[in-house]
Amino acid sequence: MPDPRFFESTGPLSLEAVCQLTGARAPDGQADMALDRVAIASRGGPGAVVFVTGRSFLEDLQRQPPSACFVPESLAGELPAGCAPLVHRNPHGAFALAAEALHAPRRHLGADPVSPEARLEPGVSLGPGVVVGPDASIGAGSVIGPNTVIGPGVAIGRNCRIGSNVSIGFALLGDRVKVLSGVVIGEAGFGATAGSTGLIDVPQLGRVILQDGVTIGAGSAVDRGAFEDTVIGENTKLDNLVHIAHNVRIGRNCVIAAQTGIAGSVTIGDGCQFGGQAGIADHLTIGDGARIGASGGVLKNVPAGETWAGFPAKPVQRWLREVAWLSRAAGVRSRGGE
């Protein structure tokens, strides 16, 4: 269930209404079934609608069988008992439409810049032009810079320093967190799928969690999760202009230099180091203590403690040998052609 601090439930909808909205084909006799939320396949339960796109996801449905599931026709007969198959040629796209209909992001629409429903502990300092949404909370001793927007339900711990022109939504921040100017935390991660008239955005229903002592450099962006959370561990430090995509999980005491991009659903262990402009492909694991050289392009999992560099990234000594060999080979050819 999306966190109610950040998302309002706009359901329930009948199964018939969901099918009319998405174009799915439902089994006979269940038109009045109530659906009140979307969920991922492994976290369904009564009232939930999920989606599967391949046979590998069917096992997840057994953990908490949902009430309904968007599914390709080839798998419609393999769902758990009691789970209504909603047959669709693009289950992910149908799921996106249902998610948008059942869950709406909370907005701060009141006339007061600081909502009367916000909770500020003693010693909080707000700069000119700060906006604080309903049910947001800010801990004692925290300083919020000018023209910063704190969205509904956001929790900021004690003794934090938030710079100017920052946007924070759908997020929970620990104590002693530093967020420098121009940062955007909690906007939607990049997710799109095919719709009936072209590409459609997939609603992002997760959160961002910044643990104690995290620093986010100026101009950086940390996307909220698609359904799970984006998490940055204690005392991890991001330089300026770093992008952290949805569902990324970063461990403690990591350092990430400027212009690094971490793609979605990457898991990074404790004590990792990233040089400037490093790029990490999605759904990879970077082991504890691993190091990625500047401009390294990582396309495979990196074992704990190893140093990788180059593109595609590989263990640094191997990369250096290959670069040296290429340099020598190029030199020989150049002399031979003179």
Image (cartoon, rainbow, N blue to C red):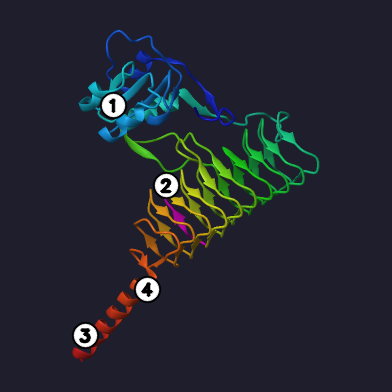
As drawn, the label of residue 71 is 1
Amino acid type of the residue that numbered disc 3 sits on in the rendered structure: Arg
Chain-order first, disc 1 or disc 2: 1
| Contact? badges 1 and 3 (CB < 8 Å) | no
Q: Which residue matches tag 4?
A: 317
Chain-order first, disc 1 or disc 3: 1
Q: Which residue matches tag 3?
A: 333
What residue span does the magenta drawing correspond to?
Answer: 258-266
Q: Which residue matches tag 2?
A: 264
In this image, 86 relative to 274: left or right?
left
Which numbered mark, 3 or 2, is in the foreground of this view? 2
Q: Residues within 10 Å of mark 4 (few under 14, many from 20)?
A: few
Which numbered mark, 2 or 4, is in the foreground of this view? 4
Residue 262: say if magenta. Answer: yes
Residue 47 position in % (x across, y down): 43, 18
Q: Is residue 314 visible?
A: yes
As drawn, the label of residue 137 is none
Front position in the image: 299 or 93: 299
Estimate the spatial distance between the alpha carbons at disc 1 and disc 3, rounded to whole Å: 58 Å
Q: Residues within 10 Å of mark 2 (few under 14, many from 20)?
A: many
Estimate the spatial distance between the alpha carbons at disc 1 and disc 2, rounded to whole Å: 24 Å
Dominant secondary structure of the residues highlighted in magenta in the image: loop
Chain-order first, disc 2 or disc 4: 2
Q: Secondary structure at mark 1?
A: strand
Which residue: 73% across, 33% down?
A: 119
